[in-house]
Image (tube, rainbow, N blue to C red):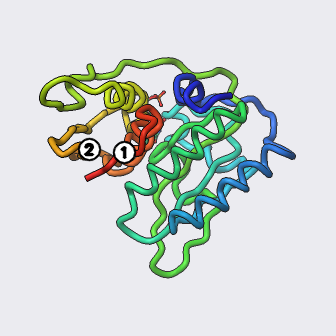
């Protein structure tokens, strides 16, 4: 599957088939994880067949079903934006492999996941992954004009970037971000206070880059 198509098709999936992720899929995910760990300074880890992580009231509240695989993300402090940026690369890649995902900051059994933290490391959140029982549903987005600012005519590449930025998953679909095209051609992306807003910002920036299809000069 082409990468843009994967972005268009991706929706959060919380109900999975009781079918393990196996063989080549595991190899491919782990290959990308190794690359991302090197590039980001974070540690992504694929955890398979853990029947405990999505039990308990929070997972029930989140309506998670048969969710037995997930990716843990940990690393140095203050790397929220990188967590979002590199994590979304994995999310989109998983979609290209025919898998489904959901970013999960809260609705799992906290303290019940397989995770070893070294001294000074921060645990950020997990990404649920598996063979979805459904493909998830499209959801509403704020209108483009509320999410960006451009003085004068909007260049095509910026509009294309915004179209995919609007599809970026954000915690509780808050979309608390603003992308501004500056006079000098640089692009400024800001997020505003809300749960996980800096992680959201990294996700949004990755989507924007995919849409723009030119090297974006971030301020
Ligand atoms: C940083 C982050 C944290 C999230 N945490 C949770 C969570 O704890 N539980 C949950 O069910 N969904 C969670 N989500 C999924 C969002 O609710 C979902 O991405 C958003 O509603 C947009 O829907 P979409 O992903 O289908 O586009 C999270 C998403 C992000 C980006």
Q: Position of residue 66 (x, y in %)?
A: 70, 35
Q: Check residue 216 in the rendering and tell me which mark sits there, or answer none.
A: 1
Q: Which quadrant of the picture is home to ligand 1?
A: top left
Secondary structure under the numbered disc 1 in the rendered image: loop
Find residue 216 and report its image quarter: top left
Toward the viewer: 217 or 46? Answer: 217
Looking at the image, residue 204 lies above or below residue 47:
above
The Cα–Cα distance between marks 1 and 2, rounded to whole angstroms, is 7 Å
Q: Give the percent coordinates (x, y) of residue 182.
A: 17, 42
Residue 157: horizontal and vertical position, in percent?
A: 36, 30
Task: Tell me: 31 left or right of 91.
Answer: right
Asked which quadrant contains residue 77, the reply is bottom left
**Disc 2 target residue:** 187
Q: What quarter of the picture does the N terminus occupy?
A: top right
Residue 206's x, y, as percent? Answer: 44, 43
Residue at the image position 19 percent from the left and 23 percent from the top: 153
Tell whether 148 sits left or right of 25. left
**What residue sits 71% from the left and 30% below the top?**
98
Quarter assignment of residue 17: top right
Q: Secondary structure at mark 2?
A: strand
């Amino acid at each position: 599957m082409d990468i843009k198509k994967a972005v268009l098709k991706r929706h959060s999936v919380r109900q999975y088939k009781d079918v393990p992720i196996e063989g080549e899929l595991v190899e491919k995910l782990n290959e990308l994880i190794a690359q991302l760990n090197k590039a980001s300074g974070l540690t992504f880890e694929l955890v398979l067949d853990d029947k405990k992580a999505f039990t308990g009231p929070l997972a029930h509240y989140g309506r998670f079903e048969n969710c037995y695989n997930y990716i843990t993300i940990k690393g140095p402090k203050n790397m929220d934006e990188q967590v979002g940026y590199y994590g979304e690369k994995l999310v989109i890649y998983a979609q290209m492999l025919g898998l489904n995902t959901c970013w999960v900051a809260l609705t799992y059994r906290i303290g019940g996941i397989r995770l070893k933290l070294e001294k000074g490391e921060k645990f950020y959140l997990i990404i649920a992954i598996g063979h979805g029982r459904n493909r998830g549903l499209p959801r509403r987005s704020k209108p483009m004009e509320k999410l960006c600012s451009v003085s004068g005519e909007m260049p095509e590449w910026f509009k294309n970037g915004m179209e995919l930025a609007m599809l970026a998953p954000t915690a509780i679909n808050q979309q608390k971000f603003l992308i501004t095209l500056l006079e000098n051609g640089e692009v400024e992306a800001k997020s505003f206070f809300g749960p996980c807003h800096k992680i959201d910002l990294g996700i949004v920036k990755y989507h924007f880059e995919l849409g723009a299809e030119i090297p974006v000069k971030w301020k």
